Image (cartoon, rainbow, N blue to C red):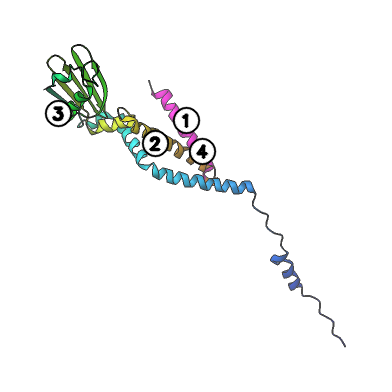
Amino acid sequence: MSRSNPPPSPTIARAGASSPANEPAAAPRPRRRALSIRFAALVRWLHIYVSMLGLAAVLFFSVTGITLNHPDWFVGEMERRIEDEGQMPTELLRSDAPGTVDGVSKLEVVESLRRDHNVRGALVEFDIDDHECLVAFKGPGYSADAFIDREDGRYTLSQNLQGFVGVINDLHKGRDAGPVWSVLVDVSAAVLTFISLSGLILIFYLKLRRVPGLALAIAGTALVGLLYWFGSP
């Protein structure tokens, strides 16, 4: 006599019904969500490494902001003036040689002042009239003015040195620092702008900190506006 197959066990049936093979496949992550995650990761990466790249510039302009706002804190860095006199060869001041301007060998005059008195900074002015030449130099925290008599070559030179704090304050403002430093100031400003905006973008991807973070950003902006409106003359 053939033996019939026993009915399936309820436990086995339940296990089979809940097996992974019978579960529906997980829905693929929406493309927009994936792009959002990638964008947040890219912004976070840029925020970190651009901040590190611009760390020195951020620190420099932060510290010099204090030195500019409180010059009375640095009374030891007083301005120093050096007065000198000298004699310039008259052939440099009245000559018909090629390369002269109104009879003055400008390059030789400038190099003579630099060599004899350690004048630094960039040449910003060289005025010539019938009797006198004015030669002016400027650099960060530094200026020099020479007045040269074209008749006998005698001159007076005044150098103004503002000390270390004066140098970094002028660098902060980009004053008399040359075109390369001017580009650095612009790049530093762009880096600071990017760090601020990327930090603002990242707060939108932090659900638990989004609302308090935005509230603080709005409060800080309002505080700056109020201080300007009511605190400035």
Earlier-in-chain disc, 4 versus 1:
4
Q: Nearer the viewer, mark 2 or mark 4?
A: 2
For label 1, the SS is: helix
Q: Nearer the viewer, mark 3 or mark 4?
A: 3
Is residue 19 rendered to the left or right of residue 40? right
Disc 1 from disc 2: Cα separation:
25 Å
**Residue, disc 4:** 214
Look at the image and give the residue range highlighted in magenta: 209-233
Quarter of the picture containing the N terminus is bottom right
Residue positioned 71% across, 66% down in the render: 21
Label 1: how many residues lie within 10 Å, few (<14), some (14-19) or many (20+)? few
**Residue, disc 1:** 222
Disc 3 from disc 1: Cα separation:
56 Å
Q: Are marks 3 and 4 in contact (CB under 8 Å)?
A: no
Question: Vertical placement of 117 versus 43: above or below?
Answer: above
From the top left corner, tell me how far across and down residue 47 is, in percent.
46, 44
From the top left corner, tell me how far across and down residue 194 is, in percent.
46, 38
Earlier-in-chain disc, 2 versus 4:
2
**Residue, disc 3:** 116
Disc 4 from disc 1: Cα separation:
12 Å
Disc 3 from disc 4: Cα separation:
61 Å
Q: Nearer the viewer, mark 3 or mark 1?
A: 3
Closer-to-camera residue (195/71): 195
Label 2: how many residues lie within 10 Å, few (<14), some (14-19) or many (20+)? some
Q: Which mark is residue 188?
A: 2
Earlier-in-chain disc, 1 versus 2:
2
